[in-house]
Structures are given as structure tokens and as C-alpha cells.
């Protein structure tokens, strides 16, 4: 076992701690529960072996099928925007590598995650099981339609850029719940948070600029050509 200053470095623990300190805390994320989750979940398990040395870098990484694992700061920001307390049922659109799923699963009661690419869904399931995160349901299908059978949700997190806000997400959001998603064109989006108020109205807030792969489906982009 390789050690540095008494710490095991073979499991990337030092790189993970530095990622949190330099990329998360230093940029203003102060949600202690999110910070602890980012310290705990091993991001390198969610990328291909050849990219594990880059797993804690300040960037997104390819995971195959024209998809990516999001930049750590973006994962932390989107998670923090949901203001999670632990009791929530969360809908995630775009399981992808499963890393964002794992962060959510460590923070809430249950995660319902939808992925349209079967290979990615099966890979993510394998790693989540390896980490004993059993409070995740993964469904293969069109994420733009949400998951009506399990609605309403306390929060909805969308890890793909949409041309607009799919109405199904608003319909499936609990009173007081929050929807976090990127909205814009294929090249650039703005991260939006929508809060469903007690009077049934929706409050919309712009959080930051961002860039995600396109949200493909009936209520999103129709295909991933040039994505």
C-alpha cells in the first residue's frame, strides 16, 4: 500500500480532499452535507480506468456514448441548489456515470434516476451497488417525461441541457420542491432553479452559466446530432 504522510494514496483520498478544498469550498459552496458527500464518494470509480488519474481534476470527462461526467464544482453546485435535508425523494434526469446519483443518494431518502442509454444505466448500477447505495431506482427511458408513477418529488435535478423547461417536471414537483436544470441552446445554457410555491406558482432563479450535453426526448431536443 502506497502511503503519503501516513495516508493511503492508492484510493485517491488525497486527490479527493484537495478537489473539495480547492474546487468546492474555495468557490463558495458552504453546504456542509454536500461537502461531506463530495469528500466521501470516490469519483474515480465512475470513470474508465484510463481516466482515473484525471478523476479529481477541475473538468468534465467523457464516459462514452457522447456523454460526460460533470465537473465536480457543477455537481456540488446543483446539489447544493436543492437545499437537501435528508428526507427527500429526488428525481434525477440523466444517470450518466452515476456519480451525481451517488452524491444525491448519500444525502436523501431515495433517488429515482432516468437514463436513456442502457449501457450507461447498467454501468452506473454496478458502481452504485459496489458502494452499497441501495436507495436508488434506475429506469431506462425518456427523461423529459419524468417519472409520473413516483411523483411528486421534493426535488428534480436535470443533468442535460434543455431548450426549455419540460412541463412534466413542473407537474411532478412537490409544493416547496425545487427543480434545477440547464436551459439554453446546444452550445451554452444557464442553470435555472425553479421553486414551486405554496400558492401553486413557480418562482424562477438564474444561478450561473453552464454547458451540458443536450437533453434528448419528446420534450427536449429530438436527437443528439452534432451534440
Image: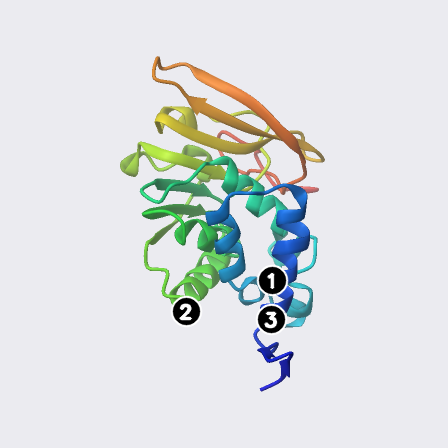
Dot label at residue 204:
none
**Nearest to N terminus: mark 2 or mark 3:** 3
* Residue labelled with disc 3: 12
| Residue nearest the viewer, comparing 64 with 150 | 150
* Residue labelled with disc 1: 17
Q: Are marks 3 and 1 in contact (CB under 8 Å)?
A: no
Q: Quadrant of residue 129?
A: bottom left
With 141 as the anchor, is 183 left or right in this view? right
Question: Are there few (<14), some (14-19), or many (20+) residues within 10 Å of tag 3?
Answer: some
**Quick one: SS at disc 1?**
helix
Question: Are there few (<14), some (14-19), or many (20+) residues within 10 Å of tag 2?
Answer: few
* 218 in relation to 113, above or below: above
- Residue at (41%, 40%) from the top-left corner? 84
Q: Position of residue 179 (x, y in %)?
A: 46, 31
- Residue at (64%, 55%) from the top-left corner? 21
Residue 132 visible (yes or no): yes
Q: Which numbered mark, 2 or 3, is in the foreground of this view?
A: 3
**Quick one: SS at disc 3?**
loop
Dot label at residue 130:
2
Amino acid at each position: 500500500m502506497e502511503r503519503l504522510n501516513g495516508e493511503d494514496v492508492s484510493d485517491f483520498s488525497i486527490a479527493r480532499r484537495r478537489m473539495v478544498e480547492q474546487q468546492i469550498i474555495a468557490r463558495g459552496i458552504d453546504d456542509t452535507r454536500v461537502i461531506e458527500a463530495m469528500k466521501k464518494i470516490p469519483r474515480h470509480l465512475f470513470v474508465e480506468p484510463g481516466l482515473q488519474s484525471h478523476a479529481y481534476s477541475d473538468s468534465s470527462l467523457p464516459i462514452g456514448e457522447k456523454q460526460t461526467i460533470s465537473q465536480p464544482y457543477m455537481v456540488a453546485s446543483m446539489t447544493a441548489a436543492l437545499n437537501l435535508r435528508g428526507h427527500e425523494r429526488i428525481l434525477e434526469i440523466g444517470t450518466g456515470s452515476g456519480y451525481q446519483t451517488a452524491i444525491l443518494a448519500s444525502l436523501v431518502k431515495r433517488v429515482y434516476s432516468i437514463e436513456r442509454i442502457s449501457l450507461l444505466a447498467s454501468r452506473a448500477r454496478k458502481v452504485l451497488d459496489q458502494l452499497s447505495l441501495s436507495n436508488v431506482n434506475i429506469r431506462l427511458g425518456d427523461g423529459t417525461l419524468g417519472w409520473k408513477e413516483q411523483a411528486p418529488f421534493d426535488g428534480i435535478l436535470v443533468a442535460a441541457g434543455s431548450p426549455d423547461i419540460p412541463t412534466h417536471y413542473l407537474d411532478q414537483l412537490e409544493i416547496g420542491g425545487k427543480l434545477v436544470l440547464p436551459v439554453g441552446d446546444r452550445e451554452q445554457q444557464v442553470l435555472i432553479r425553479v421553486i414551486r410555491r405554496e400558492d401553486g406558482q413557480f418562482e424562477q432563479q438564474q444561478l450561473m452559466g453552464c454547458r451540458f450535453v443536450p437533453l434528448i426526448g419528446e420534450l427536449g431536443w429530438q436527437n443528439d446530432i452534432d451534440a
